[in-house]
Amino acid sequence: MEYKHIRVELSPAGVMTLTLDRPERLNALSAATLDEMRDAVEGAVGRGARCLLITGEGRGFSSGADLLTGGGLPEDAGEALEKHFNPLVLALFELPIPVVAAVNGPAAGAGCSIALCADFVIAGRSAYFLQAFVNIGLIPDAGATWLLPRLVGRARAIEMMMLGERIGAEQAAAWGLISRVVEDEHLALESVALATRLAQGPTVALGLIRKLARESQSVDLVQALAAERIGQREAGWTDDFKAAVAAFLEKRPPSFAGR
């Protein structure tokens, strides 16, 4: 697929950076943009990525769904979710590699939801998060109703979703909504450094960690223990585990190949 609304770059370290590239529209999410994102996400591992970094070009991460494209109000406001938003969210969650979001400026509506799909969300100090749906008479989507209560608890999730107010980066970090806040001018450097660290880690184990952490939210302890047993077997079969044990015994830092 030829990309017109995003940019994709793969670093030598294995970090695939997906940049939303519609700065003139504050990176609004059109159907075409979402389909390009999904294509890039689904092809990330095949391209050699060991970590995915998502960010936005210009002065914001994303203003959310593109309400100006499509020629008027839709008859079925949920159709775009079924065809474009939901497949992207599922693709992000099914990735077997870590995901980092670097949030510059506003992350609003579905843009907020997509940022919060990441394992690590780093925000510039001037960034903010906004569940804007209620302000136009809609409900949160792109996984927000599932994600937010798990990230910040029901009370704060309801506040975000029903009041539709901005949550600044500092407040988002204090709530546990995001991982960390950095100065705006350091955002790119800090996010790339974290993504590179993850890309140089034990890829199979990291993928299993993100999978088990997500699944643990809907299983009981017995099921979680059983899943850990299966996951540990898979991790124990990797070359990275064997190499790391050898490095430990030889008192040197491990070097992970991602397999």
Image (cartoon, grey):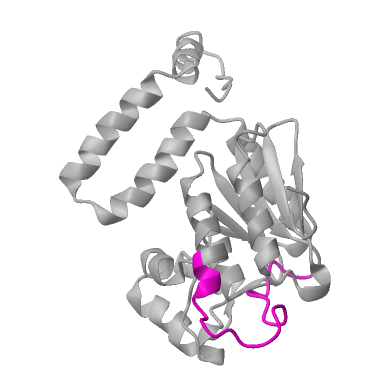
Residue 16 against residue 217 in the figure, above or below: above
Task: Where is residue 57? Give x, y as percent.
Answer: 79, 62
Count of numbered tags: 0
Q: Which segment did they paint magenta?
A: 59-82
Q: Of 126 and 226, which appears nearest the observer?
A: 226
The answer to whether residue 52 is left or right of residue 240 is right
Q: Of 157 and 65, which appears nearest the observer?
A: 65
Please tell me which residue is depicted at 36% across the width and 25% down the height of the picture. 234
Q: Of 190 and 79, which appears nearest the observer?
A: 79
Q: Of 108 and 201, which appears nearest the observer?
A: 108
Instruction: Kindly report the secondary structure that dominates the magenta region of the rendered protein.
Output: loop
Magenta stretch contains residue 152: no
* Extreme residue toward the right, this view: 24
Task: Where is residue 22? Give x, y as percent.
Answer: 79, 66
Please tell me which residue is depicted at 47% across the width and 36% down the height of the picture. 206
Q: Is residue 245 visible?
A: yes
Task: Where is residue 241? Give x, y as percent.
Answer: 44, 19
Task: Where is residue 236? Give x, y as percent.
Answer: 37, 20
Please tell me which residue is depicted at 71% across the width and 47% down the height of the picture. 17
Q: Is residue 119 visible?
A: no
Please tell me which residue is depicted at 42% across the width and 69% down the height of the picture. 148
Residue 48 against residue 24 in the figure, above or below: above
Magenta stretch contains residue 61: yes
* Extreme residue toward the front, this view: 75
Residue 207 against residue 151 in the figure, above or below: above
Q: Residue 233 is drawn in which quadrant?
A: top left
Residue 96 against residue 144 in the figure, above or below: above
* Extreme residue toward the left, this view: 222
